[in-house]
Image (tube, grey):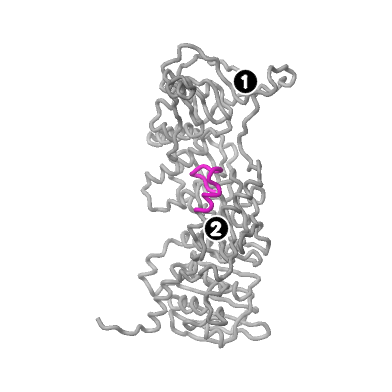
Amino acid sequence: MSIRRLPSELINRIAAGEVVERPASALKELVENALDAGAANVAIRLGAGGLDLVEVSDDGSGMEPAEMSLALERHATSKLPTDAIESVISFGFRGEALPSIASVSRLTLDSRPRGADGWRITVDHGERAGEGPAALPPGTRVRVEGLFDKVPARRKFLRTPRSEYAACLDAVKRLAMARPDVGFSLDHDGRRTLAVQPSDAPTRVAALLDRELERHGLGIDCVRDGLRLSGVISLPTFNRGMADHQYLFVNSRPVKDRLLVGSLRAAYRDLLARDRHPIAALFVEVPTSEVDINVHPAKTEVRFRDPAAVRGLIVGGLRAALEEAGHRSAAREQFAAAVNWQAEPVAARGAPVESWNPGQLITPEPALAGVMDRTLDFAHQPAARAEPATAPVPAYPLGVARGQVAATYIVAEAEDGLVIVDQHAAHERLVLERMRKAANGGEVRRQALLIPDVVELDEPDCDRLEGAAEELASFGLEIERFGPTAMLVRATPAALGKTDIPGLLRDIAAELAELGSSLALRDRLDHVAATMACHGSVRAGRILSVAEMNALLREMEVTPHSGQCNHGRPTWVKLAHADIEKLFGRR
């Protein structure tokens, strides 16, 4: 096959394949152009998730007709006053995005500089279709219709309008966080779905990610070796089941970088469980000579000259903020109550408790009344409780409960040693296996809510939950759509007992977003059930009676896979008598 020059139309379509993968890609390019034009407000309209319409209007500087024509040509840009491409501080190259998008859609470009008349140019899949005067306020409006209509090979790989809208919304949120000084609005199919006014960075991040960040977030601002880090992170106790609310911005440019994931994990390494993730929006400012922004066609990745220095800045800055926060904590549902060293009667010591319901553990009434009136034998009360040891020890594999340590670990005495149980990890597994068994038998017990709970969520999260409503009902969670950005919860699985319903729905939505539709139904159900079980389990910090501890041990002994929790961590460990004797030098 001989070598030939490609026609300009085909060149543009190839370039479009690099820059415009889906409606969200085109939207990102157009919004970036608006920001680079000095816009103070950006208005976005979408139709069918961007498949039918993507329109971006701004109040920026606008363009003369000659500039508009030049912007629609390949390799023309206002972003490079000189040839120093490494010094670019703007988002992108208007002369690259517009002709690429115009080659695979019907594009209408309207623009008007201040003090001049407006002009319109229309391009239909790479061919000029007309131009003439246009009426619009100062600024620019770009309208993209029928993306990939004449490129069926690309059109068939686009996803549903809901999925494409979710990607567009994520792109807008990233850019809105990158530029908190600019107002943004987003209308989808004629309905306003996002509106934010100019504000400071922490307020903007909280408005776009989670309003609770205003109470449960930490501000970051540190400088090291010419690099600056700012932004917002969540308290360790305010976390998510998925790492889907973590954003990195380099010189105000939103990027996706594995450096962020690794740095966050390192900063929170001893503060969060392995299956929980913080919320973060971090802004890194570095000299342009220290970062390459041109390693990806869509400018979504960057390369640092000294990645170790950037990682050290992020980890060090986050650790300093977390340490400064001290004992600050997000609100919890359960708190460990102060108790005395006391014995608790057990109806039938060592006997299996047949009627125990893992979703409704007995909450002991702390015997606080009168504590201050009693004369204590020690200056400080021991922070634990114990049951009087009796002989012989019943022959149970996990022994009998003797006490609870740090309101987290159950200490039990077995015939051949000492057993220590993580109450949260163990109960999480028990709840999951009960839910699985009930779902397989078609007899899931559910608790109807006296007053249905309304939970506010992002529209894409509501879409995912609505699509999985039948799956969730098989586990006893009855939900229905309640407007564009809310879900109505009518019943919850009885095994969960009293639970944080908004937190449960947020985590399930995040789980569904992570899983997508690539897994089989059975696997999706298992993942969702594990998320629900985590919410229904006894938390660390919950005071248990001896009867409850023994009941948990007995059920562990007859429950499959109870040796590890839903995330693979061990639920119990045993110290044999020989091991204990070695510790005390008896062997």
What's drawn in magenta, residue-wise?
262-277
| Quadrant of image for the N terminus | bottom left
Q: Neighbour class for label 2 at 10 Å: few (<14), some, many (≥20)?
A: many
Determine if the magenta segment contains residue 266: yes
**Between discs 1 and 2, the one toward the N terminus:** 2
| Residue 530, image x, y percentages | 45, 40
Res. 354 visible in picture:
no
Front in this rendered view, residue 54 or 82:
82
Seen in the image, is 310 located left or right of residue 339?
A: left
- Whole-number angstrom distance, CA of label 1 to CA of label 2: 47 Å
SS at mark 1?
loop
The quarter of the picture where residue 270 lies is: top right
Could you tell me the amino acid type at mark 2? Answer: Tyr
Q: In this view, does 488 lie above or below 133?
A: above
Depth check, front residue: 51 or 426: 426
Give the x, y percent position of residue 153: 35, 70
Q: Label 1, on which residue?
A: 341
